[in-house]
Image: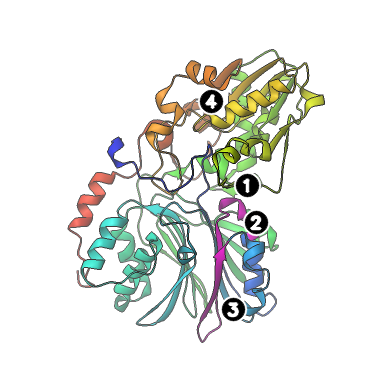
Amino acid sequence: MRLSKEYAYERIKPADDVMHEECGVFGIYMNDKTYDPAEAAYLGLYALQHRGQESAGIAVADGSGIRVHKGMGLCAEVFRNSLGSLSGGHIAIGHVRYSTCGDSAVENCQPIVLSYRKGKLAMAHNGNLVNCEILRNRLVDEGMIFQTTLDTEVMAALIARFSKLGLIDAITRMMKMVRGAYALTIMTEDALIGVRDPRGVRPLALGKLDDNYVLASESCAFDAIDAEFVRDIRPGEIVVIGKDGLKSFQAQASRETALCIFEYVYFARPDSDIDGISVYRSREAMGIRLAKAYPVCADLVGGVPDSATPAATGYAAQSGIPFAKLLAKNRYVGRTFIQPSQSLRERGVKLKLNAMKRIVHGKKLVLVDDSIVRGTTSKKIVEMLKLAGAREVHMRISSPPVKFPCYFGIDTPSHEELIGAKKSVEEIRRVIGADSLNYLTVEDLLKTVEGAGCNFCVGCFSGEYPVDIEKANKETESMKLSAEE
């Protein structure tokens, strides 16, 4: 459905020029004592750090309760002196966060832990609910008290509310009520549970470490602990892992799956496979298609590090133009670097990237990037390369123009701030100062992920979203919140 601009969320992030990550979730159930679950979760979260750098947390179940440690910052900072306090359990879930719903504050760090009629429950969530506010208000009107501003807590509260039906039925009831995107790892004192939304907007994969099961947002997390990828969790599926092994329940089936296409364009690590497709190979194919559609006479091809590098190598291979590293990246500046003043914001790109002067001087360049959001970063990079002596800079973008905000777990600017929503390709070219500019089409982008086990959400390019938000909110107003049907 096409969404009116009135539904654009107010953004709480500083004005920058990237599509911010969603979150990363991890879970592991240990049948033996070969590995410590907290250590495995730490390594898994480290591998998923690219999905969120605001906060991190791990919760551990030891059969008698749930312990949790979480805080603001990167995994290495949050767990520097605390990982030992989580040792000794047999189940762990973890989370790295970039906030898209709920303020960036310590009380909103995940996993969240709550007590309910059958004990304790911990939950970590990647995604965003579009009917969260109405559900929260209805629960508050009935006396519910919330400790956070997270949609994760709304889902946990619904599960607790329906828990007398049994945990699986309670999760199923929750899934029938919420609308939007979610990949969940849930932990009780004796079970690990994975849940994926009916459209599969957010990824969730199942792995195995000897006789132990693992859940993660991306398969690269399995490699970090020497686990083997088993399969992707199906859209609408609930998997329950306990002492009797793994059980699967197809709670909801969707006729139209809609995995976020930006997982392949930007978010996922290139060494991950998602829904049957190699992220690296898909990005490489984007560059190949760009070279076929938009050739240019140039001396060198390079990519904006790091997500655009595979597309740049694909462009170079197809065009026959040599690939080169045109920009050096400062590895100590994170993807969510937040500058405290305007002067530092203006220098932010130079803190992260610097032109390879001896390589680019006197050369005609093809610079491949994954997207242009506001255009400010692209403008600074083109200026940087030309100041370093580049004769020409031709920009090639491995996705279509971003014209619409995301409502399902990606923190994009509002419609008015997106340069692709306001200007033509030629106008954008003039703004950023490139000698030419071309984008991959939606049709070509979808061809790079042919053979996947799902369909895709391309709402940020087309304005056609997998969930009718106005309809979802109207339905939520009339939902029954009692355990009785």
Residue annotated with mark 3: 90
Query: Looking at the picture, does residue 307 appear above or below residue 22?
Result: above
Q: Distance between the residues labelled 4 and 1?
A: 20 Å
- Asked if the residues shown at circle 2 and circle 1 are in contact, with their CB atoms under 8 angstroms apart, the answer is yes
Residue annotated with mark 4: 440
Range of magenta residues: 46-72
Q: What element carries label 2?
A: helix
Q: What element carries label 4?
A: loop
* Three-letter amino acid code at the position of disc 4: Leu
Give the crowd class for mark 2: few <14, some 14-19, many >=20 residues within 10 Å.
Answer: many
* Three-letter amino acid code at the position of disc 2: Ala
Residue ID at (47%, 51%)? 202
Q: Is mark 3 on a helix, strand or loop?
A: loop
Q: Can residue 424 be seen in this view?
A: yes
Q: Earlier in the sequence, mark 4 or mark 1?
A: 1
Residue ID at (67%, 31%)? 303
Q: How far apart are marks 4 and 3 (CA)?
A: 47 Å
Q: Which of marks 4 and 3 is nearer the N terminus?
A: 3
- The answer to which of 20 and 162 lies nearer the viewer is 20
Q: Distance between the residues labelled 2 and 1?
A: 9 Å
